[in-house]
Image (spheres, grey):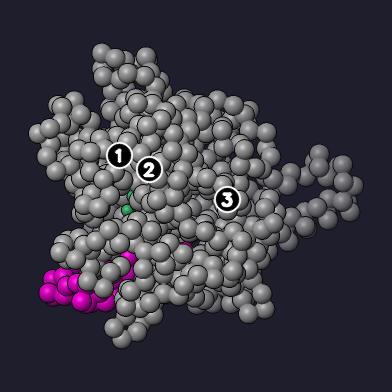
Amino acid sequence: MSTDSFEYLMQKQISRRGVLQFGLGAMLASVIPLASATTMLRQQSSLIGFKAIPAADLLDKVVVPEGYRADVFFRWGDPVSDGPEFNMDASNSAAEQALQAGMHHDAIEFYSLPAGTANSDHGLLVMNHEYLDTQIIHPDGGFLDSPHTFTADKVRKEQNAHGVSIIEVERNDAGWQIKRPSVYARRITANTPMRIAGPAAGHPLMQTTADPLGVEILGTLNNCANGKTPWGTYLTCEENFNGYFSLADETLTSAEQKQRWKRYDLGYSYYGWQQFDSRFDMQLEPNEANRFGWVVEIDPFDPQSQPVKRTALGRFAHENVAHKLAADNRIAFYSGDDAPFEYIYKFVTAEAWDGTAGAHHGKLLDDGVLFVARFDASGKGCWLPLLFGQNGLTPEQGFADQADVLIHARAAADTVGATKMDRPEWITVHPDSGEVYVSLTNNSQRGEADVDSANPRAMNLFGHLIRFSEADATATEFQWEVFVLAGDEQHGATIKGDIFANPDGLMIDQRGLLWVQTDISPSKLNAGEFTAFGNNQMLAVDPRTGESRRFLTGPTGCEVTGVTLTPDMKTMWVNIQHPGEIPKLLEEKGIQKSPQKPNAASNWPDQQENGRPRSATVLITKEDGGVIGT
Ligand code: FEO
Ligand code: CA
Ligand code: CA
Ligand code: CA
């Protein structure tokens, strides 16, 4: 019996017995209250019901447990609506790519239709396309492989393969389908006009030749993970935006500017877009890079709506954003900055949310306080506000105003003394306890001298998870602990059950089950100390017991990232990113990928001769129609 049905039956029995013996009022007063009965039962029975699968070694397919199905659902190049079909020889034009799924699927989120319902048979899937493989997107590769055939059209195709896809999905007798055509379906790309809102809107540091007022940006880039606002919009996070901007000659740059760009690792791009699009040339457009690295809000229900960059949440390599409601209905938004020695942030809205749906609530994201976390050895921690004029964020330290503090959030966090973490990736909030879980994916640069209690490994090859709790979402103090050290026993891991390395994607579902997705870099995958973990994967972890069970393994060379469930938890979608990157084990055997041989490591999912690997969304259902994870 599943945990859910067990809980349900026990609750029913308690209430029936109560009503029969004592009457309803007496039962409520004297018998265990329902909420604590549920908690008690949750503590007694495992949240995980499926049989674990083994680690996969260079298996070029998706594997799920007995009793489950995994079906390829939406691949790079598939039309979002009734647009052009994908050409396996990569000959689709830039204009066609703008009507098709982007590359390198990352985070994903389901929205029920009609809006505001909890319908589990019809809705929208909104997902990010983080970056791309230029050896796979063009027949002869991108700038690095074929500099002499690099064109403005190639730049445009690459830009159109970035951003966000919105598709309409519906379940009928034949199962889940993508609805084509759909009035909701759209692509948001690196060229979609979007509004700038919050304290940095209109600031001189946000002004460019094309946008002298600093209020409208073309596009969003490196959309890694995501968030969902309680009022029903989508938040897409711009992560490694630095990798798109090029500085040919830094001798022309002031020392101050150089230092600020260095803090964001700006100056080198392997895409080469600057050759045909001047906004990626930092000499010509020194402020364009200030317009990326933000959280962008999108209303999936209104295909005419313009995305909005919410600058109050700060500029850094945003991984994802998770929220928690405070007792007074203000909202906290948590976001990690994924780079070695970067920080964990929390934005708290100034105003309370009235509990209703609608994109007009987006303005709540424009006014509030951005905090950064300091983890103390005592197991306590505090949130340090990044407010101009306070804690050293002054003109003497190089900060001109609040917009400057937000645009240079990393420098502001350095100034206030936040804790440098081992690459903060996803953050997720437990629906009952409000505990916040963070994945720290790895850091090979720390060394003994810089070890601290929140980042306890001098050489953090495998990563760890931290969890913290707060008295309220608005609290400026928290209590924290290391939840699990990833890796294998030999390396001091504390995993109970199936082992994993480099945790990245996280989601706690409505039953309280934690889903963990891994991102072992292809440069380490399937070899050496990483052999035992096999291909990248997704596991279910019970947060109360720490028990870990392997649920899904991905195809060769991929990362598993992004997961969402329907409200009834009976349908799950998981994204498979960059199948076909060369794992270390194959690299050691001399196998190389090239534009001429894009499928050297993987031919997933189509497995066609002369095919190419394609990032894709996978649909997961249980053969008995039950709740995923049971
Ligand atoms: Fe895009 Fe930090 O993962
Ligand atoms: Ca990630
Ligand atoms: Ca990745
Ligand atoms: Ca990662």
> Would residue 613 be counted in the magenta stretch?
no
Q: Which residue is drawn at 41% across and 30% down?
A: 213
| In this view, 448 is above or below 58 | above
Per the model, the C-alpha gap separating discs 1 and 3 is 26 Å
Q: What stretch is highlighted in magenta?
A: 574-602
Instruction: Residue under label 3, please give it.
Output: 304
Instruction: Residue under label 2, please give it.
Output: 318
Q: Which label sits in the foreground, 2 or 3?
A: 3
The type of residue carrying mark 1 is: Ala
Q: Position of residue 202 (x, y in %)?
A: 42, 28
Q: Which residue is drawn at 23% across and 49% down?
A: 274
Q: Which label sits in the foreground, 1 or 3?
A: 3
Per the model, the C-alpha gap separating discs 2 and 3 is 26 Å
Residue 289: give its label.
Answer: 1
Report crowding for label 1: few under 14, some 14 to 19, many 20 or more residues within 10 A (C-alpha). Answer: many
Q: Does the residue labelled 1 lie within 8 Å of ligand 1?
A: no
